[in-house]
Amino acid sequence: MKIAMAQINTTVGDIRGNRDRVLGGMAEAQAIGADLVVFPELCLTGYPPRDLLSLHGFVEANLQALQEIGAHSGPMGALIGFVDRNPKQEGKPFCNAAALASEGRIQGVVHKTLLPTYDVFDEDRYFERGADIRVVPFAGHVLGISICEDAWNSEGFWPKPLYPLDPIKKLVEKGANLLINLSASPFESEKPLFRYRMLRDHVLRHGLPILYVNLVGGNDDLLFDGNSLALGCHGNVIAQAKSFAEDFILVDTENVKDLGYTEGDEVAQLYQALVMGTRDYARKCGFRSAVLGLSGGIDSAVTACIAAEALGAKRVLGVAMPSRYSAEESCEDARMLACNLGIGFEVIPIEPMFKEYRKSLAKAFAGRPVDTAEENLQARIRGNILMALSNKFGHLVLSTGNKSELGVGYCTLYGDMAGGLAVISDVPKTGVYRLAAYINREARLIPENTLTRPPTAELRPNQKDQDSLPPYGILDSILRLRIEEHMSVDEILKQGYDSSMVKEVLRMIQTNEYKRRQAAPGLKVTSRAFGTGRRMPVAMRSNWIPENHA
């Protein structure tokens, strides 16, 4: 069978626009002689629709769009992800579903069986699991249609399966001779290769070809990398779609050639993910331009490079906001970066405003030494300037803080945290340096001084980040073990880290939860980001930790 894999970029809630993308894909597939075209999971509503599902008329509109698509279908089949009503009297009102359209109508519907409810997923909040697993006959084949998570519970592949059911195995037992998975699988580092190994395990276990069609694009904090795959019955790669871009590929399921799996460079994938996420967040939220503070440091430099590629250099404005503590070279490095990128650049000194703030607060602060209150005033003045430019010109404000800073609260609420999108908030400081090296691989866009100068917030004389924090290599490792690998204090200490340092880092993580709760949405690129997938209380105590580890 010749099948077109339509790896499209949908927008959540844009049902008419998503419908038109599907119709366009169907026309393209028909023109190149496809027997069937497959679209991603929930492509009509966009993924994830979240509480839009509870709004009157939303699900009905997606069902109407599905009927319109069915009416336009011909002999070629189309598999489309949509939200269906739950046909049962009990349970949640909706089902995550896929429909087969052909010959002017909807020929069959399947419902998702496994509903992920972990990390960023919350499908059990909205959907009822499929009551049965059924195959769908089409064009002389028996299609085993599954939806995303249904393929993530293979017996034997997982040391401890999350669910008691293997839907792929059940489809094979019911006579499927071609496996198809409609997916909306978010990106994180190393996940594309893992998905390939998981899909290949299904093929080798059952001896059947599998087509996996994944969503691509950014929706809020979630990034979908595409990387759709088609594997022949021997586990051979017969097609692999692009990463972080729409793609349309015609696949012959009888193909015995092996193209081999293409594994992208990890840092290159990270950069492409952030560019795509920034571009889609701005576009889907209606922004045409962006503004950010340029400090001369590496975080703002990397963020500016991502923004320039995502939106175009002419649509990015960098603003240097020097204070009495800013080194002259900081502003010069910022200017050089802006020149190298071709983005707009302005200098707005904050010293006059800082003086007025201190004058106004002199009576209230009388008898108190200068401390972080005065430091944070500077960051908040800068945040106000960026927000003023946003209000006046319609720019999206990009905050430039990294995961290391956000993790331990080395950032100022309503200051450098101000913004509409936190581009690198899931990238640790050491990862920011790797991104900078990648950006500079062909030309030195980021000035050398930015790469080699010790990181500093420049909020007091001769300030360095390492005055307040452990070395970033150590800090990032402790954060990864705690946040992403969920290690206990004992487990982290067994890795050889200093006890007092570990305790202090974990204390900072906990006490700064209130800051992260108020942070701008950040692009998720690791297995656990500070965002929708990590739900920690703000008002809490840790008396459950043994006293010697408190």
Image: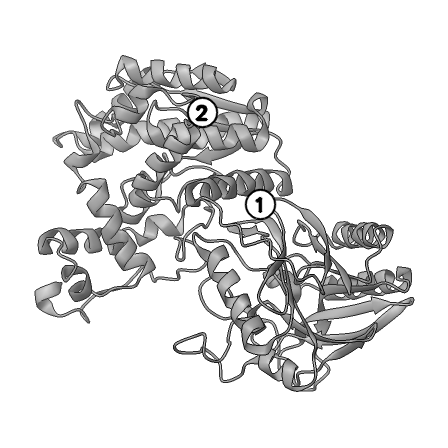
Where 93 sits versus 270, above or below? below
Q: Relative to residue 257, is residue 411 depicted above or below?
A: above
Quarter of the picture holding the C terminus: bottom left
Visual colour scheme? one colour
Residue 477 at what x, y percent from top left?
24, 50
Give the residue drawn at x 16%, y 54%.
502
Q: Horizontal and vertical percent for residue 46?
A: 66, 56
* Mark in front: 2 vs 1: 2
The N terminus lies in which quarter of the figure?
bottom right
Q: Is residue 90 left or right of residue 197?
A: right
Which of the two residues, 236 or 346, is positioned nearer the viewer here? 236
The residue most toward the front is: 257
Left or right, residue 149 beside residue 329: right
Q: Secondary structure at mark 1?
A: loop
Across and down, in percent, residue 274 comes to: 49, 41
Q: CA distance from mark 2 to mark 1?
A: 21 Å
Q: Is residue 165 left or right of residue 471?
A: right
Q: Nearer the viewer, residue 317 or 325?
A: 317
Type of amino acid under label 2: Glu
Return the mark for residue 442. 2
Q: Residue at x 88, y 69 (%)?
A: 105
Q: Is residue 383 visible?
A: no
**Quarter residue 493 falls in:** bottom left
Q: In this picture, is 365 found above or below 423?
A: above
Q: Of residues 390 and 149, which is closer to you in this image?
A: 149
Q: Secondary structure at mark 2?
A: loop
Mark 1 — residue? 244
Type of amino acid under label 1? Phe
Front in this rendered view, residue 244 or 453 = 244
Write the residue at 39% across / 60% down. 534
Q: Name the spot of residue 155 as percent of width and height, x first.
A: 48, 80
